[in-house]
Image (cartoon, grey):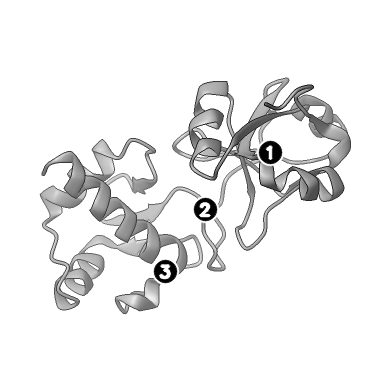
Amino acid sequence: MNQKKIIQRSKFLSLVLRHKPEKIGIQLDENGWVKVNHLLKALSEKKQPLSIEELEEVVEKNNKKRFAFNEDKSLIRASQGHSVDIKLGYEAIAPPETLFHGTATRFLESIREKGLIKGNRHHVHLSAELDTASKVGARHGKLVVLKVRSADMAKEGFEFYRSENGVWLTDHVPVEFLIFPELII
């Protein structure tokens, strides 16, 4: 598959594995998993056929590593970002000293008021790398990257999780744990 097709398939899989499984008639289990053979059959029935080899290629070559197979590749799920009610089953772990959150400047007023909130997703998404946070934030408009005092949050009892693809997750980042850039151009 060429890169354009991989991106197209990845976006559709994100839709059905994170937000709207009913769109193709599948049901995620309580941890977000669906049987691979059920997914492939449902895709075929909805005129979106995908072979197991193509699915493996999408999972492997997706630049954001959005999807994960179980050990024997009989199950698949999105790694994070769900708006449907699931339990990812990640264990709480200690975060690094600082994490980053990329966003658009148009959201700053709300963030200064409420902190980072998860909205309709299960968690706030954070990155250990400035570059990754910048790429994520740039998709939403004029970029601003916020620093999160994650180690201080953990000391105060906030829990952090890390998904299979390295995205850091937490329920909320209060304003007092955010470091805003001094100058936004």
Tell me, yes or no, whether the two marked residues, 2 and 1, touch with CB atoms within 8 Å.
no
Q: Mark 2 or mark 1: which is in front?
A: 2
Asked if residue 124 can be seen in this view, the reply is yes
Rendered view: 20 above or below 128: below
Q: Which mark is residue 5?
A: none
Q: Observer-nearest residue: 133 or 98?
A: 133
Which image quadrant: the C terminus? Answer: top right
Left or right, residue 24 beside residue 108: left
| Three-letter code, disc 1 | Phe
Q: Mark 2 or mark 3: which is in front?
A: 2
Asked if residue 73 can be seen in this view, the reply is no
Left or right, residue 178 beside residue 94: right
The residue beneath circle 1 is: 160
Disc 2/disc 3 C-alpha distance (Å)? 14 Å
Q: Residue at x 45, y 38 (%)?
A: 164
Question: SS of the residue at dot 3?
Answer: loop
Which image quadrant: the N terminus? Answer: top left
Q: Observer-nearest residue: 95 or 147?
A: 147
Q: Residue at x 67, y 54 (%)?
A: 118
Compare marks 2 and 1 and give the one earlier in the sequence.
Answer: 2
Q: Which mark is residue 28?
A: 3
The residue beneath circle 2 is: 81
Q: Residue at x 59, y 25 (%)?
A: 128
Compare marks 3 and 1 and give the one earlier in the sequence.
Answer: 3
Q: Residue at x 83, y 33 (%)?
A: 177
Left or right, residue 122 beside residue 150: left
| Three-letter code, disc 2 | Gly
| Three-letter code, disc 3 | Leu
- Residue 101 image point, x, y percent: 64, 34
Q: Residues within 10 Å of mark 2 (few under 14, many from 20)?
A: many
